[in-house]
Amino acid sequence: MAKRAVSRPKTHPATAPHRHGKGRCLRILRALSAFIDDELSEDICQEIRRHIGACPNCEGFVASLRQTVSLCRHSPASALSPTDRALMREQILRAAQAR
Amino acid sequence: MPPRTPKNFDKLYRDHVDLMYRFANRLCGESEAAKDLVQETFLNALRGFKDFRGDAQVSTWLYTIASRACLRMRRRQKGAPERELSLEQFIPTSEGEFRLQIPVDGLSPEEAFQNKELRQALDAAIDKLPKKYKMVLVLRDMEGLSAKEVGTIMGLNERAVKSRLHRARLFVRRELSARGITEAAPSHHHEPFA
């Protein structure tokens, strides 16, 4: 499988203070999953990108949400052993007969 | 004497048992409970197989049976009370909450998961999710189903699926941030998000 980077964060020379209001903050927060899933219209995406570009904290937040989703998508899964698979089949069939 | 095999059971089982176990293990977080759930799922599938009309994929039908069985099993267990997640609770209030506690910048997911602490933190975060959010996150982000399929399985419209998924992602993100690691510590109010 091709390797995909969890994120490619941009760097900012200095941390700017975060001064927008809570209403605006919630509006952006509400849209972030749709933003990272590419489900938003271009004008809303641009608004979010503009905001993220001007705010290192928000940029970090979006990057960490992307990273979280990427980790969930690539989280290793447990597998059944052939013995367990066969044993479970027997148990299911026995239970089915018993019911 | 070996048990009698109902018609088509072996193919159904062979083709889907690994898929169902992976799903069950992600939902339950441990192997014995996952095996119980898989057993319950195939038993219910056996009972309902004659009524399955093929309107959905077999896997979607099995996911639906497993999801319902999981909700029934969990109701019988004493667990964390079901609760709603509001967006406001995910607004960071301190500097460390904006980023993940364990840095993964520049790493592929496979490389990031070499870190056992990260794997455990992610598992623990998902395990803490209220079940209706956890189920959506597991189906959508871990099993890779579409929002429409998740809606079919859970009896929700796509908008509700996306809303739950978003809150579930924000919850897991927060658990992986400094706040999740040091939850007991009082929050600081410098450089707030809002």
Image (cartoon, helix red, strand yellow):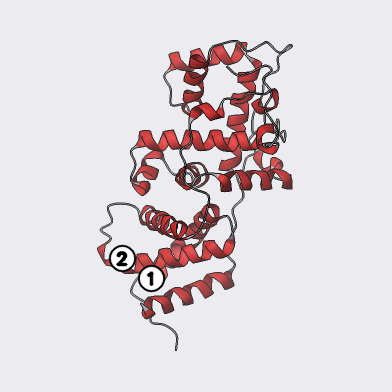
Q: Callout 1, which amino acid?
A: Phe
**Image coords of residue B179 (percent x, y):** 66, 33
- In the rendered view, tell whether residue A19 sits above or below residue B42: above
Image marks 2 and 1: residues in contact by CB distance under 8 Å: yes
Q: Callout 2, which amino acid?
A: Phe
**Image coords of residue B124 (percent x, y):** 63, 47
Q: CA distance from mark 2 to mark 1?
A: 9 Å
- In the rendered view, tell whether residue A38 sits above or below residue B148: above
Label 2 sits on residue: B49
The mark found on residue B9 in the picture is: 1
Crowd around label 2: few <14 · some 14–19 · many ≥20 (10 Å): some
Instruction: Please tell me which of labels 2 and 1 falls first in the chain.
Output: 1
Q: Nearer the viewer, mark 2 or mark 1?
A: 2
Q: Quadrant of the C terminus of chain B?
A: top right
Q: Quadrant of the N terminus of chain B?
A: bottom left
**Which secondary structure, mark 2?**
helix
**Image coords of residue A7 (percent x, y):** 64, 29
- Pick the residue in front: A35 or B161: B161
- In the rendered view, tell whether residue B110 sits above or below residue B39: above
